[in-house]
Amino acid sequence: MEVIKTDIEGVLIIEPKVFGDDRGYFLESFNAREFAEKTGLNINFVQDNESKSRYGVLRGLHYQLPPFTQSKLVKVVKGKVVDVALDIRKGSPTYGKYVTCELTEENHRQFFVPKGMAHGFVVLSEEAVFQYKCDDFYHPEAEGGIAWDDPNLAIKWPISTSAVSLSERDKHHPAFKDFESPFEF
């Protein structure tokens, strides 16, 4: 696997080795030993999640409050999404900045989103199946979010605003300026 650093410390793009021929392909989607060797991170993933969404669905920007923070390793097994990691760690030189990664069933990329990030994605294909590994269990009482369309963040979502489909919860997240970060860099 190849590890690609992004402009935000700790956010990584993972490109697995894909072995393909006329029958299809094989790849190792996760190997704890290789992940630790190549990233320097010894992560114990404890929960795997999967969602299926149609074109225009935007999920995010979500985070889990301490002490239930989560690092995530995300990927698409069907379709195409643009994934976003927003740095919400006080004291970080990239606080309030974001990076994106296009995840598709063809490129097999994975996006590592460490603790202290708000995370979201938007579906660009007819439908997408999105999987992610988490290093802590989901705690509904610890969930939080930031407005996906906050003009001060100016996230360049590659879809028209009128095409975006949100959950009720995601329609009501606060603006970033109203967010008091509990995360330290």
Image: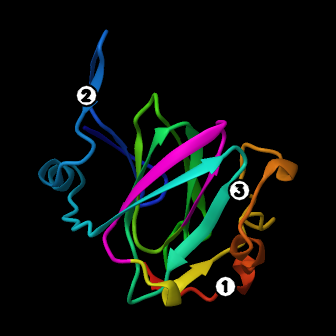
Lower sequence index among marks 2 and 1: 2
Q: Nearer the viewer, mark 2 or mark 3?
A: 2
The residue indicated by pointer 2 is: 26
Quadrant for the N terminus in the image: top left
The magenta stretch spans residue 72: no
The residue indicated by pointer 3 is: 155
For marks 2 and 1, give the CA distance: 43 Å
Query: Which secondary structure, mark 3?
Result: loop
Left or right of 96: which side holds 158?
right
Q: Nearer the viewer, residue 58 or 10?
A: 58
Q: Amino acid at mark 3?
A: Ile
Mark 3 surroundings: few (<14), some (14-19) or many (≥20) residues within 10 A: some
Q: Amino acid at mark 1?
A: Phe
The residues colored magenta run: 119-137
Query: Residue 136 at what x, y percent from top left?
Result: 33, 76
For marks 2 and 3, give the CA distance: 34 Å
Lower sequence index among marks 2 and 3: 2
Query: Residue 70 at what x, y percent from top left?
Result: 39, 73
Q: Amino acid at mark 2?
A: Phe
Q: Residue at x 35, y 77 (%)?
A: 137
The overriding secondary structure of the stretch rendered in magenta is strand
